Image: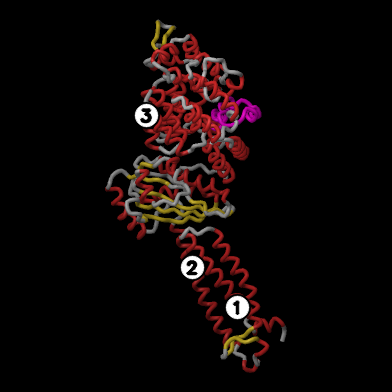
Amino acid sequence: MSFFDELKRRNVFRVAIGYVITAWLLLQVVDLVLENINAPDWVMQVFMLALAIGFPLAIFFAWAFEMTPEGVKRESEVDRSQSIAPQTGQKLNRTIILVLVMAVAFLLYKQLGMQTHTPGEATDAVQANTTTSNLQEVAETGPVTIAVLPFVNMSSDPEQEYFSDGITEEILNRLAKIRELQVAARTSVFSFKGQNQDVRKIGEMLGVGTILEGSVRRDGEQVRITAQLIRTSDGFHLWSETYDRKLENIFAIQDDIASQISTALEISLGINTSGSAKPVDPKVYDLFLRARALHRNRGEGLLEAVNLFRQALEIDPDYAPAWAGLAHSYSVITFYISPQELANIGDPFELSRAATQQALSLDPELATALHAMANNLLDELEWAQAQDYYERALLLDPDSTDIMEDYGNMLLYSLQVDKALKVRDRMIDLDPFVPLFQQVSADMYDTAGDYEKRDESIRTLVSIDPEIVFSITWTLQRLFENRQFEEMHRYVDEVDLKHWATTDAMHRTIEWLRDPQQDPDDEIVTTLLWVPALAMLANRPDIFFDLISDTRDTTRYTYTTEIYNPGLSAEETRVVRELPQTKAFLKDVRLPGYWRMVGWPDICSPIGEDDFECH
């Protein structure tokens, strides 16, 4: 008997076929179960490894052993005249057929499920009816509110975190454009990232009636997105879906999820899922998401964000959002990198302006591009034009807290304090957990002289991010206001000042603040450049104006608040406002011409057609 015939006689082929089919079916079922319990990728990998190891073992046992009426025996111990291998083969045939039928049924089920949920089509009728009845209760209780929690990265590579965050943001942005929905802002929901809190508690904190959560698993160009909508009053699941797509269809998936949620919430939303997103190269989109994540984290990662935006634009120079993102990164990079790094990239403001113009030439109605242009114009001291662009951007994206932050700052720096506080209120209502917004809030209340609310904002800021530069500068300022010099020394030893100042120089500056009537040396002056407000609080306006005269022209306007409220006594404040340097500074930042258009602040008034005074 040939070796091939012997393999057939011992049912080795049948065992191999049965093992492969059974293993495949088992993996499908396990994958489905693990997906629903959000198990990590390594669990599935262990199953696959175990089944792969089991295959040669099954072949070996099929060859070396045989089933007999007395049980399993070594094949060499079985009398071939009494072998029941043929009967065992028939049983294996029936088992293979049964497993094969189950596998085909599973394939058909999966295929029909995929067809049911192609982009733009409604969900299964029974599921839709059930969801509708559940959501009627949500809609009847008041405005439909929703928070999109950060989708969990289920990929084996933790570096794919930016991708799952990007998917979350895109879905959030699509829902935010629906007027009938009130959507919790991005940064508020991202503050819950990585926290395993009950959705009912999160819903109460964010003030929303529904929460969308999910997971993203990416494997090369394949992506699986699972999303589920939950009612926060009782944690009841209202809707869920799983999407298996190629990355090239990611925009269709985002639209599909947003559309299905909207349908489930029984709102007539009119979303055009076929034309709402321009096709984008997956590589470009991937680079864009990574760059945007780094930009929002600020810090030294801004250099890498610029690099990634540029890589995206090398592939697709017509992708307007990447140009706008590049413009925003350039406009703030000066505050977060060292002078040496800054010297290597050229003039960031010229680069920002060029990127902004390119973005607007590609998409004149892109809110982020209009926002970038407003920032550029403000840096050029074109106050009226900047205000116009901020307001145009907010018309297109009325819930953008990023735009509100810069618009509110423009109003503050032009000393329209009451208007600035109104923008602040809306911004904080939408996004209370953003360190940068709490810094803006503290700055506004400080300028308005409401120190109780200012200190509340500072406490919130420090609790969110104690290491951000604004937490450090505000803490130093508050300690100096109370003349707590020893506390200032201890605090400086505890924090990382990064490239802004050395610890020794900061200690020497604190000692100078004990007796600020003496002239500071060059090292102290360099340190004060980081926090010019300390010079004003020390009642040394002469040093303050010298410091800001050394500051780059495009940010000098940010120090107008020190003139409005220098934190001094009433008499000392009057002296500061009436100084010739104050008048020269306000002229230099071109505010009088702007005030003649929009109205004068309460501390200044016009004299004739060409002059003014502050008091």
Q: Disc 3 marks which residue? A: 452
Range of residues picked out in magenta:
328-357
Q: Would residue 505 be found to the left or right of residue 256 on screen?
A: right
Q: Position of residue 218 (x, y in %)?
A: 55, 53
Between circles 3 and 2, the one closer to the viewer is 3
The disc, 3 or 2, on the residue closer to the chain's N-terminal end is 2
Residue at 30% x, 49% y: name it: 138
Q: Would residue 381 be found to the left or right of residue 231 on screen?
A: right
Q: Which mark is residue 106?
A: 2
**What secondary structure prevails in the magenta region?**
helix
Q: Position of residue 580 (x, y in %)?
A: 48, 9
The disc, 1 or 2, on the residue closer to the chain's N-terminal end is 1
The disc, 3 or 1, on the residue closer to the chain's N-terminal end is 1
SS of the residue at dot 2? helix
Q: Quadrant of residue 453?
A: top left
- Do labels 3 and 1 touch, CB within 8 Å? no
Q: Quadrant of residue 185?
A: top left
Residue at 46% x, 23% y: name it: 386
